[in-house]
Structures are given as structure tokens and as C-alpha cells.
Image (cartoon, rainbow, N blue to C red):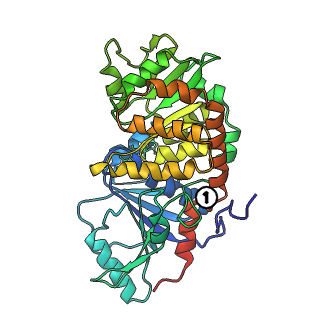
Amino acid sequence: MSAHINSPNTNSSTIRTWDIFCRVIDNYGDIGVCWRLARQLATEHQQQVRLWVDDLDALIRIWPDALKIDQQILAGVEVRHWPPAFAADIDIAQVVIEAFACDIPDAYLQAMAAQKRAGSAPVWINLEYLSAESWVEDCHGMTSIHPATGLRKTFFFPGFSVKTGGLLREQDLIICRDTFDKRLFLDQINIIQRDESLLVSLFAYENPAIASLLAAWITSPQPVHCLVPQGKILTSINQQPGIELAPGKPFIQGNLQLEVIPFLTQRQYDQLLWACDINFVRGEDSFVRAQWAGKPFVWHIYPQEEQVHLIKLDAFLDKFLAEKSPEFAGKLRGTWHHWNEDKDLNNQWAELLALFPNWQQACRDWHQQLVQQPDLAGQLLALADKPTL
Ligand code: TRH
């Protein structure tokens, strides 16, 4: 085991106050990442964390204990609704995180500047989106000086190598996964898995390629039992002739059994990933959690203009498939591209399935590589410990 497996500073960190600012652009990834980070800082590192979020509905979707109120304590985190206007006398935190370049409120920025003038500038961090592109290593940790206030901001890039900010990984994640009771979990979500079938979870954006994937599964050499948390891909599924998938109304044809399950809590969703043999994931947070599950996964990347997301897709595949056999690497890359470019997956599926042991091994190897690296929250704590100018 490498010296890096535990984060650079574990529970012995100085206790600081943190403000995390989260604007929900769409879907659940923005809040998914911020909420996970906030919980980890509070429960694992005993930090005093306040999370400002502009869309409480998104939080409620992944954490149903949350309420639609201005202020509440949840899982050791003070959750605040990000109001349209901030009071000028707001007490600022020692560490301020703006997630995904969300621009902190001006009144808050002015309070930070006043704090700097008083001789104790807060640590100001921009937590960026995840990408496997190589430039990330060069940009991680770069700083810029805010022209009007002189405050220094550090750009923190998550990533897949030791030269980046790493990935969110709770200290007990792997042990929880390894001691998890799959049968009990499937009972809780009312799923009875057929013994010989591959259990698949399907979380994706709308995707016309679903037609060919379903066709491939109907004639799959190994039966497929697919669980679909309620969401966007269900719309694409139900656009297929003859399919009307709904809660309690599965679709069964040939070797495919397709079932809707409720949208799970963030904690249960991890368990779904652990329970399944293959996970279709999307965006950022579910993509990372699938890697911690250590099981085969297919990524539906968040689409961007001018197809720039395909560059990111390949950057990840280049890393993930390095040193893998050309046959397996070619098949996996092909399948991921077909899924992301609305192309026919019918042939891809059987070919990839024939290499399933290679796929499983690749995911275990990748997991083993990632787990050696310092985790994201630990690296943020290390950054907060550095003296500010
Ligand atoms: O929802 P996403 O597509 O989120 C995003 C946003 O669109 C964001 O704007 C974009 O920048 C980013 O992707 C790249 O996918 P993601 O990141 O996987 O977030 C989903 C969250 O929802 C994740 O925290 C897991 C959680 N989840 C549940 O809690 N229960 C569920 O049943 C499912 C399917 C997901």
C-alpha cells in the first residue's frame, strides 16, 4: 500500500470554517459534488462547513432529508439557501470555495477584501470541473490576483493523477463497498435478480442510441437485467415502439428485463453501483463513483458545444486504456463513442461482452491506480493549511 492512500492530512487538520458556494446549472452534478465534499469535510475532518446552494430542489432530490428552508443542519453541514442579495455584514469563512467558477456574491467578496485589509485574507479556491486532459496538471494550483481587491484565488482541478487535485473519496468508502450486503440492498429496492443475468444500472441523458442498445440486449448472449433510476433516459426508452416502462411495469423481451427504480439517495446510488455488474453513468459525480465501484462502466459525458466533450472522452480513455490489449481497448473505445455519438451499438455489445473478463480486470487495475492517489478533500485541507498572502 502506498504512503498516499490516506490523504495528506486526515482527522488531525486544524478546524476551520468553510463556505462552499454552489450554483445548480442543471441536473444533479453541481450539487452532487458540492454536497459530497461538504459532508466529507464536516464528518470526516470535523470542519465547520456552510454550503450555499441556489436550488434546494436539486439537493432534496439526492438527499430527501433536506427541506426547502433558508437554513438547516444536515449531516453536520449548515445548508443555506443562496439568497439573491447578501447582507453586507456577512461573516465570511476562513476557506471559501466557489464551485465550478460560480462567482461568489459581490457583498461577500467585499467582506473578504475587508478581511484581507485587516491582515487575515481567507483562502479562496475555485473548484473546477473534472477532466482527464493533460493541461489540467499544468493548471492545477495556479493562482490569480483579483484586480479590484488584491485577493488571491487558487484554481483547484480534480483529476486522475498525482499532479492534480484527485477525486472525492471518503476514508471508509472502500471498506463500506467491500462489506456491503448486495442481497439486502436489492431487497430494499424490491429487485429480484435472475441468477444468470448481468445486472446493469442505466443513468444517462436522453440518447437515441438506446434503441440499438436495447436491441442488442434483447438478443444478448447473456441475459441482461437493467435497472433504470427515474430520469432523462426513461424518456428515450419510452420513445421506442412497444415500450411503456413505468414503476411496477417492467419490460421483458428475449434476454432483456428492464425495470424502473425510484431515484435513489446519493448514498443508495453508490450501493446500486456496487451491486451491479455494469454501470452506465454520466456527468461527473456518478462517473467518479462508478470508478470507485471498480466494476465495468460506460460514460455518457455531458455534451458540450462543438463536440469538445469528445476530446475529454478520449483523454479519459487514453489514460484508462493505457497498456491494455489493442483488441479490448478498441472495442471499449468504440462502444463509448457509439453511446456518445448516437451510433448503432448492436454489434458493439456482443463483441465487448466477449471480452468481459478483460473489462472487469481493466476496472480493477484502474481502481487500484486511483486509490494510491491523495483524495480531493485531503488535498483541499492541505491547501487551506498553506499560509495565504
Ligand atoms: O446529473 P448530472 O448529469 O450532472 C452534471 C450537471 O449536468 C452539471 O451541470 C455538469 O456540469 C456535470 O454533470 C458534468 O450527472 P452527475 O455528475 O453524475 O450527478 C448526478 C448526481 O445524482 C450524483 O451525485 C449521483 C446522484 N444520484 C442520486 O443521488 N440518485 C440516483 O438515483 C442517481 C441516478 C443519481
**Quadrant for ligand 1?**
top left
For badge 1, the amino acid type reads Glu
Q: Is residue 139 above or below residue 114?
A: above
Q: Quadrant for the C terminus, please.
A: bottom left
x and y percent of residue 319 in the render?
Answer: 55, 53
Drawn side of residue 36 relative to residue 234, left or right: right
x and y percent of residue 120 in the render?
Answer: 44, 85
Q: Quadrant for the N terminus, please.
A: bottom right
Name the residue nearer the viewer: 327 or 7: 327
Residue on which the image places disc 1 = 44
Drawn side of residue 353 relative to residue 53, left or right: right
Determine the image quadrant of residue 194: top right
Total labels drawn: 1
Determine the image quadrant of residue 126: bottom left
Asked whether the viewer can see residue 269, the reply is no
Q: Is residue 314 above or below residue 149?
A: above
**Extreme residue in the front direction:** 326
Q: Is residue 285 above or below residue 279?
A: below
Residue drawn at point x = 56 percent, y = 69 percent:
381
Judge the density around disc 1: few (<14), some (14-19), many (≥20) Cα neighbours within 10 Å.
some
x and y percent of residue 42 in the render?
Answer: 54, 59
Drawn side of residue 68 relative to residue 143, left or right: left
**Extreme residue in the left direction:** 85
Residue drawn at point x = 41 percent, y = 19 percent:
247
Asked whether the viewer can see residue 320, the reply is yes
Name the residue nearer the viewer: 145 or 277: 277
Drawn side of residue 163 relative to residue 85, left or right: right
The secondary element bearing badge 1 is classed as helix
x and y percent of residue 208 in the render?
Answer: 33, 29
